[in-house]
Amino acid sequence: MEQLALLSEGFAQALTPMNLVWVLVGAILGTAVGVLPGLGSAMAVALLLPVTFSLEPTAAFIMFAGVYFGGLFGDSTSGILLNTPGNSSAIASTFEGHRMAKNGQAAKALATAAMGAFIGGLIATTLVVFFAPTLVKLATVFGPAEYFALAVFAFLAISAVVAESVIRGIAALGIGLALALVGVDGPSGTARFTLGMPQLFDGISVIVITVGLLALGEVFHIAARIHRDPAATQITAKGKARLGLADIKKALPAWFRGTAFGAPFGLIPAGGAEVPTFLAYGTEKHLAKRRGDKEFGATGSIRGLAAPEAAANATAGTAMGALLALGLPTSATAAIMLAAFQQYGMQPGPLLFERSGDLVWALLASLFIGLAILVMINMPFAAVWAKLLTIPKHYLYAGITVFSMLGVYAISSSLIDLWLLIGIGLVGFMMRRYNIPLAPVLIAVILGPMAETELRRALAVSEGDLGILIGSPITVTLYLVLATALAVSGIQHLRHRRNASAEEAKEDALV
């Protein structure tokens, strides 16, 4: 096949000693920056962009391949260990990953994430090489109504599936949408919920909300329980960064399911990797309920970490294909990569493969190399990262607070953001106190603006006719699947409540 011949030429260019050094440096630097709370993979690429200007184009983009995937793994590392994901694409991995870390399985959690990143990225990059022209057609069939239907699907599916109570899930969704509405309304230019403060005209940053809910909320939660339940703050980093045969049997189907969710989403600008990672997480939680898996939501489930991690990296892999073939950046990191291409006088798009084919195939080959190097350096280093948890807890959580504050302030240099961080942290504490799920808040904040924009676009095109929202096979299919999922979820919640009531009645009868 022609693709194999071109890819082999790309490997011939990439597999030189100096280029291997650059991809290794990129993977290490990307992981190191991604680990820092509040920075993340997009910031890693942005910070390291000037470093590559002195390199020739092939070496620069090969280094970026390492930074690209290294930053994604760093996002998950900080989320698993510190409950502070470096980027919103790692939020779903944080839920079960941090529970595993708190249960003394930090090294195993990091090994699961590393293998998930490798499998998801490997499959997605292979799809880009062989099926890019076919996959790109998926992006052209999505219009405003389809994007809105996708957002509604994500909102309600996550709220119904992730939450133990549908009411609590919808309440969390409402909190997220309220936070997303703060700022200036684009079409009308009207300020909404800004309290007259110009600093809020641009809205509340996703990073402020994510760090506040997950990191600072966890710090407040631990501080509130430290005297009543001292054992709750003791995290031990036992075990090795090695997955046994039983662990692989559990994780392998979840890795493939996550990859299946993530690969298509890299081709469409639907909020980056957030939607597929949350859908993958919700699917694993639904399957865990059917299996009666007691680990999920308690001590941490390998499946609940493996699926969203593979989904995130699969999305990143196909996002690179969309960037190269269409010139369409479908994530913040891809947008920064687009700037890197333009810096070298190249414009990604249909003509890129003809005009700069040598560089493109070398870059695709370096993505495979970057994934391999990433898993080789992070599998043994997982145990080293896990040693962060051996830091005395009062120092560790104080450090998380300081890094969270510094990370947020470094991005905007705004004191208002620090006050918002504290306020949202208190909201996160109260949500934990009353068992309100965090995932619907985060997915609403991330996708809320997109849903509003696409709804307005669809209604503008149809001149106010609501029929456009269900006027295509894709929207009808999404809404039908959503209605079925909600019905099934409602029946399961009722059945669970009925079983719980029956067990309570039996216990009362015995007493």
Image (cartoon, rainbow, N blue to C red):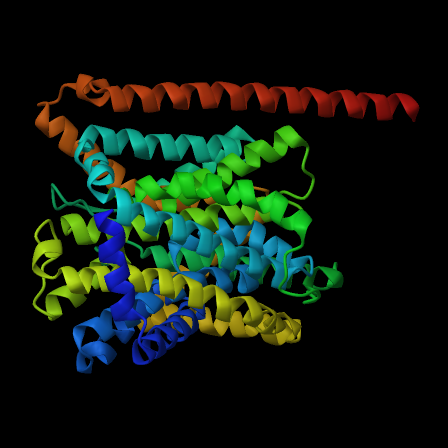
Q: Left of 284 or right of it: where is 129?
A: left
Q: Which residue is drawn at 62% across and 44% down?
A: 249
- Specify the quadrant of the image occupied by residue 46: bottom left
Residue at the limit of the structure toward the right, as seen here: 511
Q: Please say whether residue 156 is visible from this viewpoint.
A: yes
Residue 471, horizontal then vertical, whole percent:
20, 18
- In this rendering, the count of numbered labels is 0
Q: Left of 230 or right of it: where is 138?
A: left
Q: Left of 4 or right of it: where is 281?
A: right
Residue 179, horizontal then vertical, whole percent:
35, 47
Q: Residue at x 54, y 64 (%)?
A: 82
Q: Which residue is drawn at 20% across and 33% down?
A: 142
Q: Please say whether residue 315 is visible from this viewpoint.
A: no
Q: Quadrant of the C terminus?
A: top right
- Is residue 91 or residue 227 the one in the foreground? 91
Residue 56, horizontal then vertical, whole percent:
17, 78
Residue 61, horizontal then vertical, whole percent:
24, 69
- Is residue 182 or residue 302 the one in the foreground? 302
- Specify the quadrant of the image occupied by residue 52: bottom left
Q: Residue at x 31, y 55 (%)?
A: 204
State whether residue 402 is above or below residue 436.
Answer: below
